[in-house]
Image: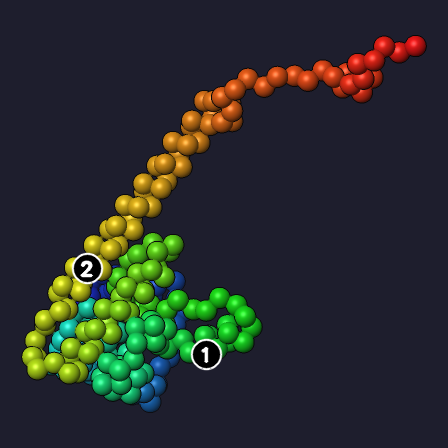
């Protein structure tokens, strides 16, 4: 049985191994027809997806080059689609951009008097995904501010090329490095403080005196009769 024309060598070897232990069943011509049709549909959808991604990439680079350079084609397109247009996104403040897409969670948290969400669609950006868990909120706030500026430049600017996107990306990367270094320094200081406390017997440098007044009649100094 030669399957090299329709699948890779590794997949072919796996299928042949399964054939040795599989009982199998008879497949009619009608079943084969529907199977082939389904396979053709999957291949067609995969090819269409690749073409759609190329179209989206080209359109985003032409419409919003700075926003695309900052958060990528997919996240930028989702932000624009959720806002309604690039101009509406440019009008929104950075606090709105930060939680865009998490409106239901926001109103639910306000109603229940709980903590509000820190990010919405912007969570899918590579910056937030690469940031540590304790710094995701801060990185989302900085990224939302730069996205708001980039959207305004793309919507109202005269140039159709990347202008502030490169500088904004460098600022965010530098911010993440500063947060990481600050966290490392904080952990180092905490470890040094704990070691110092352990060496000093729990942090007390002075020798504790023993009060023996309670050992003799509750501390009374008068002679008993």
Q: Would residue 225 appear left or right of 155 to someone viewing this image?
A: right
In the rendered view, how is the structure colored? rainbow
Query: Looking at the image, can residue 84 be seen?
Result: yes
The mark that comes first in sequence, 1 or 2, is 1
Q: Residue furthest front?
A: 222
Q: Which residue in the structure is indicated by mark 1?
A: 104
Which residue is depicted at the point 29% across and 51% down?
Answer: 179
Residue 95 higher or lower than 202, as above or below: below
Q: Find residue 72 and report its image quarter.
A: bottom left
Closer mark to the observer between disc 1 and disc 2? 2
Which residue is depicted at the point 54% across and 70% down?
Answer: 113
Residue 161 locus on image (x, y percent): 7, 76
Q: Which residue in the structure is indicated by mark 2?
A: 171
Q: Nearer the viewer, residue 221 or 59?
A: 221
Secondary-structure class at tag 1: helix
Q: Residue furthest bottom?
A: 30
Which residue is depicted at the point 78% across and 18% down?
Answer: 219
Could you classify mark 2 by the number of other residues whose Cα lies within 10 Å: few (under 14), some (14-19), or many (20 or more)?
some
Which quadrant does the N terminus fall into?
bottom left
């Amino acid at each position: 049985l030669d399957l090299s024309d329709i699948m890779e060598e590794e997949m072919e070897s796996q299928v042949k191994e399964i054939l040795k232990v599989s009982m199998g069943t008879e497949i009619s011509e009608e079943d084969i027809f529907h199977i082939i049709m389904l396979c053709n549909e999957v291949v067609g959808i995969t090819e269409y997806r690749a073409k759609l991604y190329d179209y989206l990439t080209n359109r985003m680079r032409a419409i919003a080059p700075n926003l695309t350079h900052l958060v990528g084609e997919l996240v930028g397109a989702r932000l624009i689609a959720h806002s309604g247009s690039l101009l509406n996104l440019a009008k929104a403040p950075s606090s709105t951009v930060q939680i865009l897409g998490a409106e239901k969670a926001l109103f639910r948290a306000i109603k229940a008097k709980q903590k509000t969400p820190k990010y919405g669609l912007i969570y899918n950006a590579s910056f937030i995904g690469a940031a540590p868990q304790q710094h995701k909120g801060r990185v989302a706030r900085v990224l939302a501010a730069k996205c708001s500026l980039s959207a305004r430049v793309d919507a109202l600017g005269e140039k159709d090329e990347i202008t502030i996107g490169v500088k904004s990306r460098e600022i965010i990367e530098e911010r993440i490095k500063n947060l990481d270094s600050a966290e490392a320094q904080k952990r180092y200081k905490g470890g040094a403080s704990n070691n110092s406390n352990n060496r000093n017997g729990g942090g007390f440098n002075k020798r504790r005196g023993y009060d023996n007044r309670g050992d003799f009649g509750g501390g009374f100094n008068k002679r008993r009769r």
